[in-house]
Image (cartoon, rainbow, N blue to C red):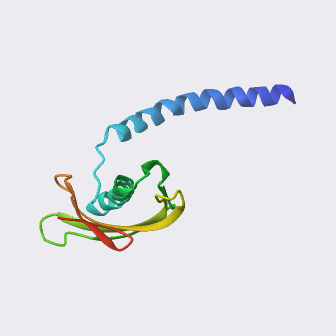
Amino acid sequence: MWNFLVGLFVFIYVIGSFADDDKKKTVDKEINKPVVLTVDQKIDRQESTIATMCTQAVKTTAKYPSKVDPDWGFTGQSYKNFSGTNNHRFLIKRTGDMMNGLGMMVPYEATCKVDWNHVSGDTQLIEFYLNGDLLYSK
């Protein structure tokens, strides 16, 4: 019985070693192909980056930047090519807690309006609201 199992294992190993060469060639071809993303895929990837930028804007305005604790996730809307110039507008809302001057953690809601051009990669903050107050406007 053991001889049969050892023989079967050796047989599978030998056959598998021949198949690995073909797999490796196929995988190498796939790796060398350029990755082309659609505009929608680029927008999906950029949305989380812009949400992180919104959190950084909150930290910039906070009295204690290290005490800004954003909630997981964000609410985001994107408007694809709204002006006909390859610009996409994102409206991101982030919530969380931040420390005030008395040392208490208070909730915040930040809203960022950002334009992003998928061709050039330029990102511009258009408006930034913190707890309903406009702090930045282009």
Left or right: residue 3 versus residue 13 is: right
Q: Quadrant of residue 34?
A: top left
Give the residue furthest to the right. Answer: 1
Total marks in image: 0
- The residue located at (35%, 74%) in the rendering is 132
Can the viewer see residue 74? no
Query: Where's residue 90, x and y in %?
Result: 29, 67
Left or right: residue 108 versus residue 53 is: right
- The residue located at (67%, 29%) in the rendering is 11
Can the viewer see residue 62? yes
Which residue is nearer to you in this view: 54 or 66? 66
- The residue located at (39%, 34%) in the rendering is 28
Give the residue furthest to the left. Answer: 85
Which residue is nearer to you in this view: 2 or 101? 101
Q: Quadrant of residue 78?
A: bottom left
* Quadrant, the N terminus: top right
Which residue is nearer to you in this view: 99 or 6? 99
Which residue is nearer to you in this view: 82 or 58? 58
Give the residue furthest to the front. Answer: 102
Query: Where's residue 27, x and y in %?
Result: 42, 38
- The residue located at (45%, 33%) in the rendering is 24
Query: Where's residue 40, x and y in %?
Result: 30, 63
* Quadrant, the C terminus: bottom left
- Figure check: 18 above or below 65: above
Query: Where's residue 121, x and y in %?
Result: 21, 52
